[in-house]
Image: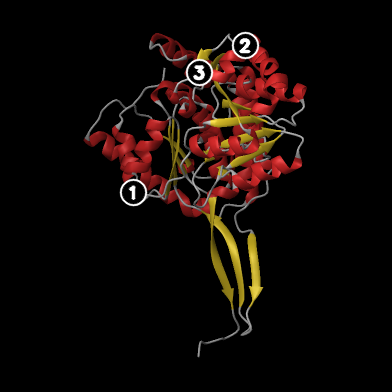
Amino acid sequence: MLKLHEKSGEDTVALMADIGRRARAAARPLAVASTRAKNDALVAMAEAILRNEQAILDANAIDTSNGEEAGLSGSFMDRLKLNPSRIKAMAEGIREIAALKDPVGETIAAWDRPNGLRIERVRTPLGVIGVIYESRPNVTADAGALCLKAGNPVILRGGSDSLNSSAAIHACMVEGLKAAGLPQESIQLVQTTDRAAVGEMLKGLGGNLDVIIPRGGKSLVGRVQTEARVPVFAHLEGICHLYVDRSADLDMAVNIAVNAKMRRTGVCGAAETLLVDRAAASTHLVPILEALRAAGCEIHADAEVMKAFADASPATDADWVTEYLDAVIAVKLVDGIAGAIEHIETFSSHHTEAIVAEDTAAVERFFNEIDSAILLHNASTQFADGGEFGMGAEIGIATGKMHARGPVGVEQLTSFKYRVRGSGQVRP
């Protein structure tokens, strides 16, 4: 079991201040590190994770045993648990990040002025990033790898429930940094269960932290947004909707609905509300709900749906604003695309919404009028994932509107600066 820093108070303040200083010291050498060095580190990290699979599983077994004793929910345990396939996927995700184009130094735009000045807008690292997350040990690998590729030192503060797993993964990340000759402080894990560590990060670690990315439940994100003294990329809850239009292909609608809800119920892209066009109730509603029940899903339905499908529980007002992260879905009939848009814009967390339809006019209206980070047509909401977007991985799905929105991948972890080239110009 991981040996943790259990002391609190002044000891934690000193610990976090030291972590911040070391991260800042790593920022400059990492910002100018070559693409090859970063890629070499990432490949070495992936190899170390595969090579240390058993050590990671052993550490995870401690966390899952503790979680079971603590009575953690099934969805929480699903996010916490690792197995050989998930470890392999973690390593593959890091390799995919290594294969991505290096964004640092990329010229986003360039133009010439009448006075002969040449102006370039160029991508640069954001700086020191703090990631605060709950339960998912794979975030340790995803966040560390993405921040490294974008030239940013990162301070990782995982949940206490997954700290043994995260520490085992972090050791592999450090091994990769060493192999490539990059600063070990480029990826640091906060190895204390003291909640004061989060408070110190929210204060900015004495000016050494540039951005915070929270990834977890509503209470965590709310605290970060309220208390943070540095910019925040907010990953709010995923109250994701699936709308089945009257023009939808029935077999497609059934397959998408079951996948969107049941593939993995504990991920933020899982559908939480199913909206069915009232005009399709007689043809589409029951087959979809029967398939969901057969897959083990509990259904909370409005009064109209209850009349057609008795094997459901009555929905309450709370169901329309609940992120279940479990095998539960809220179901409602709506008046076509207009009714779907009205419901989604009223109750959505602006994360991910999907429409199943063959009517192109309905699809275009759905895409144009709904203001969520990710919109899908004839595809499962579970594709709301940076890896599925070709980003290798993501730190989270940003639901805000400033800087980053949707999957936060390598490009979203950069800023930019202007380079102006002249030939002696002075301003009159």
> Do callouts 3 and 2 mark residues in contact (Cβ within 8 Å)?
no
Q: Is residue 414 above or below residue 178?
A: below
Q: Nearer the viewer, residue 261 or 157?
A: 261
Of the residues under marks 2 and 1, which one precedes in the sequence? 1
Label 2 and label 1: CA atoms lie apart by: 46 Å
| Quadrant containing the N terminus in the rendered view | top left
Residue 272 position within the rendered picture, expressed as x and y whole percent measured from the top left: 55, 25
Residue furthest to the left = 10
Quadrant in which residue 270 is drawn: top right
Residue under label 1, please give it. 229
In the displayed structure image, the side of residue 279 where residue 329 appears, left or right: left
Residue under label 3, please give it. 75
Of the residues under marks 3 and 1, which one precedes in the sequence? 3
In the displayed structure image, the side of residue 42 where residue 12 appears, left or right: left
Residue under label 2, please give it. 293
Label 3 and label 2: CA atoms lie apart by: 18 Å
Residue 92 position within the rendered picture, expressed as x and y whole percent measured from the top left: 66, 31
Q: Nearer the viewer, residue 307 or 78?
A: 307
Instruction: Please tell me how crowded label 1 is: few (under 14), some (14-19), or many (20+) other residues with Cα within 10 Å.
Output: some
Name the front one of labels 3 and 1: 3
Quadrant in which residue 352 is drawn: top right
In the displayed structure image, the side of residue 125 where residue 69 appears, left or right: left
Amino acid type, residue under disc 3 in the picture: Ser
Q: Nearer the viewer, residue 389 or 366?
A: 366
Residue furthest to the bottom = 428
Amino acid type, residue under disc 1 in the picture: Arg
Instruction: Please tell me how crowded label 3 is: few (under 14), some (14-19), or many (20+) other residues with Cα within 10 Å.
Output: some
> Do callouts 2 and 1 mark residues in contact (Cβ within 8 Å)?
no
SS category of the residue bearing label 2: helix
